[in-house]
Image (cartoon, rainbow, N blue to C red):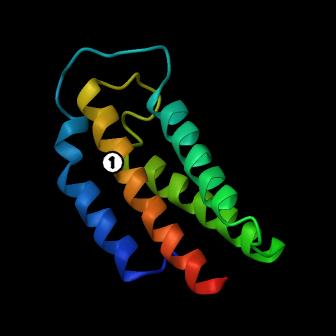
Amino acid sequence: MVVESDGYAALIEYFVENLATFLEPGDRVGSETIDDLVHELVVSQIMAVCDQNQDMPQTLRFAVMSEADKVVADLEEILSSVWNQKPTFAQINVIEEYIGLVKNLFDAAVSECV
């Protein structure tokens, strides 16, 4: 659906191009780790996809949730060295933008399936 798409591959490349943001020193903010932030953002975006598509079949909902788990797993693999650290503002911005773009892929995929 999403994770095997060309769009997702392009987003992974985009994220890797911004990986230096996660290697730079900076002031850590908040009480959440990058793990917490990623999970929170993915959950909120997937809930938004489901809320926007109330008539989505249950099987498609499960497929979306499964794909979302893969997105989180990919980010965990890419960010394994900083996964349990608190993020900097720059890192938060990259993660928020990336997950927003991933949501756009989900929106497009769901609209094709519904």
- The answer to whether 63 appears left or right of 80 in the picture is right
- Kindly identify the amino acid type of the residue bearing the numbered disc 1: Glu
Identify the residue at horizontal 49%, vertical 14% (top origin). 31
Identify the residue at horizontal 33%, vertical 64% (top origin). 12
Residue count near mark 1 (Cα–Cα under 10 Å), binned few <14, some 14–19, many ≥20: few
Q: Nearer the viewer, residue 3 or 58?
A: 58
Q: Is residue 1 visible?
A: no
| 58, above or below 42, in the image | below
| 53, above or below 43, in the image | below
Q: Nearer the viewer, residue 5 or 96?
A: 96
Q: Position of residue 106 (x, y in %)?
A: 52, 68
| 16, above or below 42, in the image | below
- Residue of label 1: 97
Q: Position of residue 38 (x, y in %)?
A: 49, 40
Q: Position of residue 96 (x, y in %)?
A: 38, 42
Instruction: Classify mark 1: helix, strand or loop.
Output: helix
Count of numbered circles in the view: 1
Query: In which quadrant is the N terminus drawn?
Result: bottom right
Q: Position of residue 13 (x, y in %)?
A: 25, 65
Identify the residue at horizontal 55%, vertical 50% (top origin). 45
- Specify the quadrant of the image occupied by residue 91: top left
| 8, above or below 50, in the image | below
- The answer to whether 33 appears left or right of 78 in the picture is right
Query: In which quadrant is the C terminus drawn?
Result: bottom right
Identify the residue at horizontal 28%, vertical 55% (top origin). 15
- Specify the quadrant of the image occupied by residue 111: bottom right
Q: Is residue 83 visible?
A: yes
- The answer to whether 35 appears left or right of 79 in the picture is right
- The answer to whether 37 appears left or right of 67 in the picture is left
